[in-house]
Amino acid sequence: MESVYAHIDANTQKYIDRLGEAIAIPSISGDASHRSDVFRMGAWLKTELVRLGFSAIEEHLPGKQTLQGHELDLPPVVLATFGEDNNKPTVLVYGHYDVQPALKDDGWKYEPFQMVHEKETGRIYGRGSTDDKAPILSWLWVVEAYKALGKELPVNLKVCFEGMEESGSEGLDDIIFKEADRYFKNVDCVCISDNYWLGTKKPCLTYGLRGVSYFMLEIHGPAKDLHSGVFGGTVHEPMTDLIHIMSKLVSPDGKILIPGIYDDVAPVTEDENKLYQGLDFTLTDIHNATESETTIHESVRDTLMHRWRFPSLSLHGIEGAFYAPGAKTVIPAKVIGKFSIRSVPNQTPERIAEIVKTHVESEFKKLKSRNTLKFEAPQGGKCWVADVNNWNFVAARSAIEKVFKTSPDLTREGGSIPVTLTFQEALNKSVLLLPMGRSDDGAHSTNEKIDLFNYIEGIKLLATYLEEVAAVPK
Amino acid sequence: MESVYAHIDANTQKYIDRLGEAIAIPSISGDASHRSDVFRMGAWLKTELVRLGFSAIEEHLPGKQTLQGHELDLPPVVLATFGEDNNKPTVLVYGHYDVQPALKDDGWKYEPFQMVHEKETGRIYGRGSTDDKAPILSWLWVVEAYKALGKELPVNLKVCFEGMEESGSEGLDDIIFKEADRYFKNVDCVCISDNYWLGTKKPCLTYGLRGVSYFMLEIHGPAKDLHSGVFGGTVHEPMTDLIHIMSKLVSPDGKILIPGIYDDVAPVTEDENKLYQGLDFTLTDIHNATESETTIHESVRDTLMHRWRFPSLSLHGIEGAFYAPGAKTVIPAKVIGKFSIRSVPNQTPERIAEIVKTHVESEFKKLKSRNTLKFEAPQGGKCWVADVNNWNFVAARSAIEKVFKTSPDLTREGGSIPVTLTFQEALNKSVLLLPMGRSDDGAHSTNEKIDLFNYIEGIKLLATYLEEVAAVPK
């Protein structure tokens, strides 16, 4: 791989400049006035795919959406293929070319859509730098490097780039399921580079995501809001009932109080326990991120296990109650408590919804209230966990060791990346999350950046990963 | 009084027409665009006071306010005197000439600012009809009747009419305290006609009001809102802490859970118990008003005692949490729970604030949370209760018996009418609440009305009350 690495190092400035070109297109999917920029970014990618000799380039239009009062076309899901050799494994890579909104006034030190490469810190600033433009471009630079060197790519590569990730990936799932037996037919494994290192020093591989189930707990009594002077003390108040039920969901130290909720949680195995040794993480990382010292657990292991592999329940708020500043003495007529549960193997959204409903109804009954309870549990998202000993992970681990001269942290994420599960279910092949940026990159925040080190070594990592995929026994 | 009653009956149409004139002035104090109408209504009253021969007419301007982005002059508090005979008692009457907002589109059957006298039902519709234009005009028609009949008024009458009651009576208290030893110097008793009969059939006298203490309970943890996927299960969430504390304030059947809160509540005496017999009230009245059957207590007595003479605690809402429709998986960084306590004799706002603070802090301590609690208790309003055997009440009771041929209900209100307490404290004289309208008049609501019966018999009642004040032994 020495020639490939040397080529990548030699072309560093070119990679920076082209990332700057991509950052300069404000492809904000959540802002109707920038929809044409999202299309422009899709077209920019297609031009690159053509230039690099990708074949079977297809743009799948997912349809229309209504956003901010405008009916808009959804930007294309771009599919392309490099190589169709039946003797090689086929790797599908996913990424997205849309970005979060950003305004200089939000607190950016530079214009968010003008890339700035700060030489003294090695940081490349700009909206989309780390999320997810550097990763998707890097796949292209790998192909370019092999072509420039006259080397054959060790695998067939398929790309799937979407333009709606920051806005719920509208329409993507349908396309993936529809193309599972056609465009994605020969795919052997999937690699997604759209998350981050656990810390700032050590690369990682991600093998798990929590699921999420959302709940709405509505209590209604009177037909309209009441004056608390006139009715306080004489009627069952919906807020009182709701607060009592909500207090029976989770304890202040994070323990979920719903009977049976922990029954399906997979026990911690000895092997799994080992994965928590030597992680690039300290409690200070959370203290810095939250700007507080409000952590519950004393050890890194306990903290990360509660982020990654134990369920949690958060109370988000109440719809229908008084929420503005100041004082108002209303008795709200109808209130809706909102909470969600982050789920883990082997919990299922169906089972969670069932026991939450049973618990909520039983707690409501205890109140002996004359108000009415309505419980809503919209479709929950499943959790995901991969076998870290699968050849896809073995290949990625080996690639990291070769490029970074260190073993990666094996991590999970506490949140969800729904496309991971879609690929898993539609293709039934190993899915791997291979992050490029660091935990402090500020994706979705102000001053988003990617370190030049992560970008350039990242390109090398992706190239090496493809080599290892071809090489490892399957 | 036969000649007075005959005169009043003979002038019914004139009273209706003049109420129509007053209703046609949309004196909405809470809407900056109607401020000139409030002034116009004040001027209309002054013209009447002059025409009727009131003396010492003074307009006190309370100053300025900022409303809806406009700096506005506050409308005048109008003071006037009729008679200055040292041998007669002096009665101070209070009322307000501003009204609540109203739009036909809100669900009115008629234009809210065009009076409609529905002959078949005997109802006079219009914003301000019952709250509080008919009552304040009625005092004037009493003076007019005596003058027309060449009769001497049995008392000296002083009026205090304000134009900001529906918007917090801004500036009024200062004027009352300032004038206590000057304009109001010789006042012997105060009569306020600005509340309602308990039901729809029987007149009443009101001798008590609950006080109100408002509380804000702030919990803060992280410096900014957090993603529940990333941080759920690892940090102390302010919402969880707040919900737990709020659940320790009041039980679903309305019992306040704060230790010591009932210690200062005056015991129910045998005499007081008797006041609850034969009241014009059923549970159906509450069911109709709330359009629900969510009452807590089974008897009228228990229900009204919990409205009038026991404290209640209502949870109003949470500032800082997610309140919009839909689903959002945020962990709010700072949340402020809002609740209030309606207080009764012999509770004091100071003592209530003290024990609420102690309880809240003790419950927070139990949570062993690393978040921070901040407790705010703005100045509370005191409760008020009058001696129903005072001569002012005896006079009013006797007047009701003469006009309506029935004994009045003796009632309290669950809410507060702050000016009552202001007069009580500034003048240290008996204050009486003498309602004119019925419980179903819809003050503050759509289709506000006053029944012609209540208006006309109300004028007779006010005249008779003045006679009785002069007659009763003091």
Image (cartoon, coloured by chain):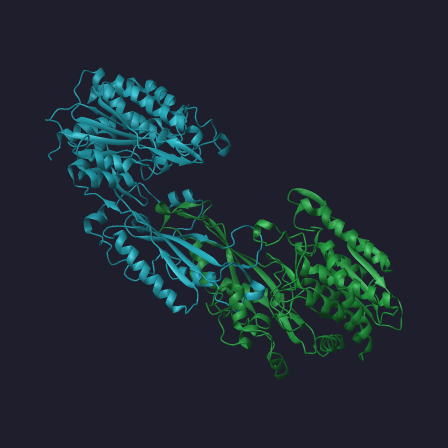
Chain colours: A cyan, B green
Q: Which one is in front, A170 or B455?
A: B455
- Residue located 54% across and 50% down the image: A324
Residue B52 percent location from the top left of the image:
85, 60
Position of residue B201 relative to residue A382, above or below, is below
Residue A425's image quarter? Answer: top left
- Residue located 54% across and 75% down the image: B300
Residue B223 percent location from the top left of the image:
47, 45
Residue A392 percent location from the top left of the image:
18, 36
Position of residue A85 relative to residue B235, above or below, is above
Residue B102 percent location from the top left of the image:
62, 52
Q: Which one is in front, A311 or A218?
A: A218
Q: Quadrant of the C terminus of chain A?
A: top left
Position of residue B297 relative to residue B379, above or below, is below
Is residue B465 rendered to the left or right of residue B105? right
Q: Is residue B450 visible?
A: yes
Is residue A214 rendered to the left or right of residue A158? right
